[in-house]
Image (cartoon, grey):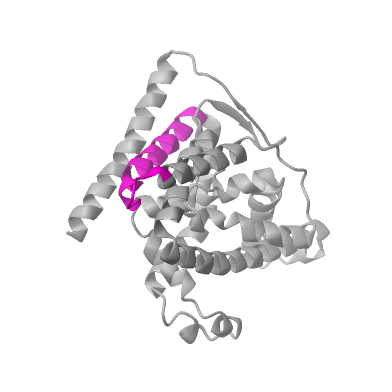
Amino acid sequence: MGTANKIPGVSGGVVALALNFYDELLESIKNINIKSLLRLEFRFAFINSNKSLLLYISLGIIVSYFSTSKLLDFLLSEYELFVWSMFFGLVIGTIIHLQHKINNWNSKSISLILLGVIIGLIISYLDPMAENDNLLFVFICGVLSICGMIIPGLSGSFLLIILGNYVLLLVDSVNVLFDTISSVIIGDFEFLQDSYTISRLKIIVVFTLGSVTGLVLLSKIMSLLLTKYNNTIQSLIFGFIIGSLGVLWPWKSTSLENLNITRYIPEINTSFFIAILHILIGTFIVLMLSKYEKSRTK
């Protein structure tokens, strides 16, 4: 999920849905006792939550930012088409897997699915804003970026590109944090005299606070909506995930420097067929995981 959340266009919530732990994750986050958490009374803060699930996901997200996401950064620079093709296939597989979540296939649900598709496509083609390091705006970015975990199909990283702060928050600030941790480990505290490092550390702290706030608030809202309007929300999510394929379209060139995405129609050549193979592999992986989960549940 951490790796998915960092990559623009990929939603951590879709990963949770594909692996069938989304509902439990949402319920666990919703049940966190905020008052106890603010008082640092961790024993009571997570008493009604699945502590193991939250712990392992949190550790996985942290580790991914310094390991698997680094590997994917390399793969995206060397094999961009095939990486995007794999993700495209994973989402197609998730769409097939999620059909059963919609209880009533009627004109209302179909209309909501189409609305979700349209919203997803509109977000896909929005022009990005300019970078903004104002701490209040950074906090808002944190709240919105966590949407990828709570709202399947909505990529938090892609939202940061739209807001103009992807490089600032998920590249520059994360790299500064990594370098700072490395300096502390070897006993080098010269970074305390570096204004650039201090400013980036402030930004990553405020961004984290925004993310935690958004995680708790959005999980409660999402859980309430799913309880009261399950079929409506599931239809919107289903359409939203379909619409997110516009972001994941493999045949594109992406530049994080000027935050530009250019999509194009592929030529029929060897790379095209290898990309199609990766799409099929991605789809197959999710369907096999879905089949395994259903057999295990039975």
Residue drawn at (52%, 19%) of the image = 265
Which of the 4 image quarters holds residue 90?
top left
Question: Can you say whether 191 is above or below 90 in the image?
Answer: below
Quadrant that contains the C terminus: bottom left
Q: Which residues are magenta?
A: 80-107
Q: Residue at x 44, y 65 (%)?
A: 228
Q: Position of residue 75 (x, y in %)?
A: 49, 36
Quadrant of the rendered image containing residue 227: bottom left
- Vertical placement of residue 109 versus 280, above or below: below
Our reading of the magenta stretch's main secondary structure is helix
Q: Is residue 58 above or below residue 163?
A: below
Q: Position of residue 139 (x, y in %)?
A: 70, 62
In magenta stretch: residue 149: no
Q: Tell me if residue 238 comes above or below residue 178 in the rendering.
A: above
Q: Please report the residue visible at 54 percent of the width from the left and 44 percent of the height from the top.
A: 7
- Depth check, front residue: 26 or 39: 26
Q: Nearer the viewer, residue 265 or 72?
A: 265
Asked whether residue 105 is drawn in magenta, I would say yes
| Residue shown at 38% from the left, 23% from the top | 274
